[in-house]
Image (tube, helix red, strand yellow):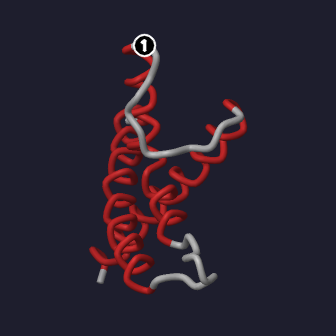
Amino acid sequence: MNEFVLATFITAVGLCVAGAGTHLYQWLLREPAHLRYDGKTAVSSLGHVFMSFVCGPYILLQMGWQQEDDGTVALGSALLSAFVAFGWSFITGLFVMSLYVALRY
């Protein structure tokens, strides 16, 4: 049971960081956040890759909830994006928590 609670906590941390990072990115740069790797320079491309890694779970959840032409949400798309996004959130949360432990102790 302890392992399940720890995994849930790490996933929640990753999703919170992804959501906060996405909104901060959109607020500072005044452009929507997308999963991308393009850029005018190599540094810009690396920035987009880093942003996509950190903010990816939240962006993917938003992509899964997009409406179809008739105004409905496809169940398969929503479930698949949620499954991938929560797995990705675990990786992001693990990265953030390990960075916290490394800097704290």
Q: Relative to 4, does residue 92 appear above or below in the rendering? A: above
Q: Residue at x 58, y 76 (%)?
A: 69
* The N terminus, quarter of image: bottom left
Q: Please tell me which residue lies in front, 92 or 55.
A: 55
Place residue 68 in its image quadrant: bottom right
Q: Relative to 29, does residue 15 appear above or below in the rendering? A: below
Q: Residue at x 56, y 44 (%)?
A: 33
The percent coordinates of residue 59 (x first, y second) are 50, 55
Q: Please tell me which residue lies in front, 7 or 92.
A: 92
Q: Please tell me which residue lies in front, 16 or 48.
A: 48
Assess disc 1: are there few (<14), some (14-19) or many (≥20) residues with their C-alpha within 10 Å of its C-alpha.
few
Q: Which residue is mark 1?
A: 41
Q: Secondary structure at mark 1?
A: loop
Q: Residue at x 54, y 64 (%)?
A: 62
* The C terminus, quarter of image: top left
Q: Residue furthest front?
A: 69
The percent coordinates of residue 56 (x first, y second) are 43, 51
Q: Is residue 12 left or right of residue 83?
A: right
The percent coordinates of residue 2 (x first, y second) are 31, 77
